[in-house]
Amino acid sequence: QVQLVESGGGLVQPGGSLRLSCAASEFRLAYYAIGWFRQAPGKEREGVSCISTRDGSIYYADSVKGRFTISRDNSKNTVYLQMNSLEPEDTAVYYCASRRPSCMRSSREYEYWGQGTQVLVSS
């Protein structure tokens, strides 16, 4: 069974950093585009970042450009989301999701999802 597992969330003060991880079992992440999405209470799920598989293209939402960095370590079968300069508006449950072969903007285009990890940015 395909499974994605996120980790690395937690409580951080504004201006702080967290690194989220998305690990997979039963399939190789290197063959999939991996997207990070987030959903805050009362809001719709929104795309944060994505890394494609074919050419390694990377995409970021305008709200996180310059602060978040997505990367993949194929040897560890893991995709990371490094989040710096965190703001209270970044508070949400963060999910990773996979699809082939390339990134898409809509969350409906993604096939497999993790269970999510909570990020809380607060002083």
Image: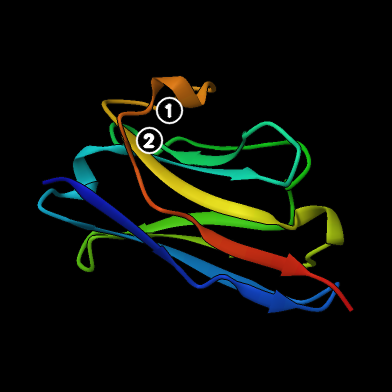
Mark linked to residue 17: none
> Residue 117 versus residue 78: which sits nearer the camera?
117
Label 2 to label 1: alpha-carbon separation: 5 Å
Give me the residue at 11% from left, 46% from top: 1
* Image side of residue 36 versus residue 47, left or right: left
Residue 104 position, x and y percent, is 46, 22
Amino acid marked by disc 2: Ser
Instruction: Indicate the colouring scheme.
Output: rainbow
Give me the residue at 49% from left, 27% from top: 107
Label 2 vs 1, first from the N-terminus: 2
> Residue 41 versus residue 21: which sits nearer the camera?
41
Residue position for label 1? 103
* Image side of residue 50 versus residue 113, left or right: right
Residue position for label 2? 52
- Whether residue 84 is visible to the viewer of this picture, yes or no, is no
Residue at the farthest right position = 123
Residue at the farthest front position = 42
- The number of numbered discs placed on residues in the rendered structure image is 2
Give me the residue at 23% from left, 61% from top: 77
Give me the residue at 23% from left, 68% from top: 76
Amino acid marked by disc 1: Cys
Residue 102 position, x and y percent, is 35, 26
Residue 122 position (above or below residue 49): below
- Whether residue 45 is visible to the viewer of this picture, yes or no, is yes
Q: Quadrant of residue 63?
A: top right
Residue 49 position, x and y percent, is 56, 42
Q: Are marks 2 and 1 in contact (CB under 8 Å)?
A: yes
Question: Which quarter of the image is occupied by the C terminus?
Answer: bottom right
Mark 1 residue element? loop
Residue 30 position (above or below residue 86): above
Mark 2 residue element? loop
Residue 102 position (above or below residue 14): above
